[in-house]
Every structure is written in structure tokens, then in C-alpha cells.
Amino acid sequence: MEAILIIIFIVGYLAIALEHNLKVDKLVPALGMMAILWAIIAVAHLDVFEVNTATKSLEQHHIEGVLLHHLGKTAEILVFLLGAMTIVEIIDYFDGFSTIKSYVKTKRKSSLLWLFTTLAFILSAIIDNLTATIVLITILQKIVKEKEVRLWYAGLIVIAANAGGAWSPIGDVTTTMLWIANKVTASSLIEHVLLPSIFCYAVPTFIASKLKIFKGKIATEELKDEKPTSKHSATMFYLGLAGILFVPIFKTITHLPPYMGMMLSLAIVSIFAEYFSSSKFTMADASTGGGALPASHSPIHHSLSKIEMPSILFFLGILMAVAALESLGMLFEFAGVLESSVPLLGTEHASTHISDLVVLLLGIGSAIIDNVPLVAASIGMFSIPTDEPAWHFIAYSAGTGGSMLIIGSAAGVVAMGMEKIDFFWYFKKIAWLALIGFLSGFAVFVLLRDFLLNAA
């Protein structure tokens, strides 16, 4: 029976990976796979377990209790993401991201490259790599008119956005999952992954800035000083970012789950949004063909209607599907096989029992298949303490490895759609830069980890 469950999971996984070829949104196989796996477990009366982290052993439980346990853990992630997405949409409602345009002062291609990649690196750590990529490519389209040049900028933005999301507990879904699952703490994650992530984006940017494509100035007219749609745009931009940044502080002070802090931040941002929306201003609504929204229109209702629910449902499906395999003890047993069969490369401090080679393969794998289920499986497989270096290594590898292919990350997929980037163009022009950046950060992480372990 377990073989049947594994086959169903593999088939569903392939359908997710090949969503562009099948022309079926990945939420469909994810939800179907989740329901079928748990249904088979229930009908076949299979034994389900939970991992006892203290004894590193499996303890048998009733299916309803196990299902509720995993649903609760998944709901923590989904509620957190709903709050973060809503804050980002509120910022956009007030045209807050237009504030970023004020930082664009240069027309030199190389300087502009450093500016956009650095903004991508910083913004993705706060508002997540997907949103940062959308915002910056939208601005890029108004500045750079040459299509070929713009594609290069977009490719480097993807690398920088993924690198920026890897070191922040709120910058990427995978790091958020590790943080909420208490595998990493915010301070320790930043300590171990920030420097490797900087190398991951800075090395490719430096190499690219020396290429012929980034010589000279951009062929564009002088940038127009467009006024923001709302007079409160800058206020809401900085307030929204501050609200999201407050979440790790809230968790540190109260020791409550991160979604509680995100809900508090959402409430505070919403108060200001409702107050400002009652003042005398209007903004263009793209969905109504440029018509003006009435001043009484609720920014909260508008923002909630703009949330990308397919992504939320996909996360629900894939996380609960992985949880089904975890509840049967499969991931725990597979971790044991890895520990005994894969050499512990490059570390004398192998208390993690996770080989550097395994983490390297995880990063490469995230470029081919979605990194969310890979990290979800890792959480279920390895029963190692909070803030073990292996968790930080997984956060870095899964977060940045996806840059090596255009379809390997959410940031890459959205850039592909916005700029119509060809898969093979990206593979030929950008993939080698992403690989160099990934390996540079990988090497820096190993050196930094060994230094910190020796210092301790």
C-alpha cells in the first residue's frame, strides 16, 4: 500500500513540475494528491505516527489527531502568508511602490544594474522575492526600452531576489516554513545566511557589470517625474514595510507564533489605510478600465480581493500531501537511509547528520522542481535541533538554487511571464551566472559555518 502512495505522490509531483506543459495550474494536482493520499490512509486504516523530537522516534497516534496536527501547522503558514500578501496589496493600493522610483538617478547601465539588484536583494527580504521581482520589473519596463538589455536586467533581478529571500525569515516561503516550524530563529538565520546570500547576488552582478551588454548608458528619454496616485503613497510604503519587519520582533518578545504578529501588523496598517482612504483622494483602478475608485472604497476589501488564492491553495495541497507521507513515517525512514549511505562531506562538526552533498543536491533540485515540497520534506525527515547549521544551509540552498533555471523559482516564473523570457535564452545567458553565485555563496557558507563552530 505504501508503494501505491509513493506512486501517487510522484505522479502528482510530476504534474506540478510540468504545469506549463500540461497547461494545468499546479494547485489542481496538489489538492488532488493531498485528498487522495489522506483518503487512502483513512480507508486502508494505515498506522500514522508523529515524530518525538526528544527521543527521535515515531509515536503512533489516531489519524484524526495527526491530521489536525498537520493542518494546524500548515494553517500557521497560510495565515501568515495571507497577512503578508494583504499588507503588500494595501501598499500597492496607495501606489506606495512608486516611492522606489525616486532612487533611480543614474542612466549608466552598470550603475543601474547594481541599483536594481541591490533593491531586489533588500526588498525581497521584506516583501518576499516574488513581489519584489514584480515591482522592480514593472519599474524597469518604464526605464529601459531596449528589449535585449531589459532581459539581462530581469535575469539578474531574479538572482538577487532569490538571494535576498534566503536570509530573511519573511523573504521566501521556504525560509518562512523553517522559521514557523521552529527549525531556525530569525537572528541565527541572518547570522549564518546573510553573508553567503550577499556573495550569491554580488558575484554574478559584478561579473555581469563587466560584460559588453552593460557598457555605456541606457537608451531612454529623461525619466518623467510622475507624481504618485495618492499623497499617502510614501507613508503607506514605509508603514507597510515596518509592519512586516515588526513580526520577527513580536515573535522574539512574546514567543507567540509569527502569524499572530503578522495579524497585529495587518490591523495597524489597515487602521491607517482606512483613515487615509476616507480623505479626499482617488486612484485609478486597472480592473475597471482606469475609472476612479470612490473615496469611501475600502482598501482592505480591495486588497483582500487581489490576494493570489491559487498560491495559498497550492501551499495547502502540497504541504498536506507531504504531511501524509510524514505521518506514515516514510520521510523519517528515508532520512535514516541518507544518514547511513551519504558521506558527511566537508565538516568535522557533523552533529547535523546531513551531508553537504545532500544540501547541494537539494539546491540543484530546487531549480528543477518546486522548492516548497523539498523543504517540507526536509522538515519531516530530519529530527535535528533548532538552529543547527544544516537548517541554515537548507534555507540558503533551497532559496537560491532555483535561480539556475527560469522555471526554478516563483521570481523566475513571474519574470518569464512579464518579459516573455525564453527558457533557453535564460539557460544560455543567465544560468551560468546564477550557478557561479550559488556556488560562491555555498563556499562562503561552509567557511563561515566552520569558523563559527570553531569559535564556539
Image: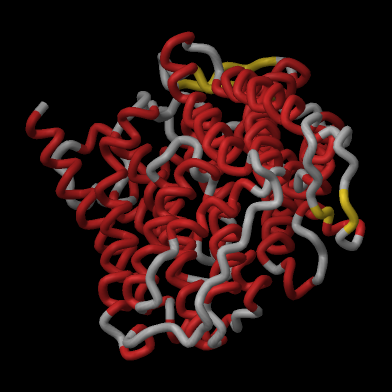
Q: Relative to the observer, which residue lies in front, 163 or 84?
A: 84
Q: Identify the coloring.
A: secondary structure
72 versus 276 height, above or below: above
Q: Quadrant of residue 321?
A: top right
Residue name at image x 52 percent, y 86 percent:
425
Residue 105 image position (x, y, % from top left) = 40, 66
Residue 6 image position (x, y, % from top left) = 67, 49
User: Farthest residue toward the top?
Assistant: 254
Residue name at image x 73 percent, y 56 percent:
12
Residue name at image x 73 percent, y 42 percent:
312
User: Farthest residue toward the bottom?
Assistant: 212
Q: Is residue 409 visible?
A: no
Q: Is residue 30 visible?
A: yes
Q: Relative to the observer, which residue lies in front, 286 or 76?
A: 286
Residue 129 image position (x, y, % from top left) = 52, 52
Q: Report the number of numbered marks.
A: 0
Q: Relative to the observer, which residue lies in front, 284 or 92?
A: 284
Apparent side of residue 332 relative to residue 6 in the rendered image (left or right): left
User: Farthest residue toward the left?
Assistant: 455
Q: Quadrant of residue 13?
A: bottom right
Name the image quarter holding the C terminus.
top left
148 versus 41 height, above or below: below
Residue 235 image position (x, y, % from top left) = 57, 36
Apparent side of residue 220 relative to residue 395 in the rendered image (left or right): right
Name the image quarter holding the N terminus.
top right
421 versus 17 height, above or below: below
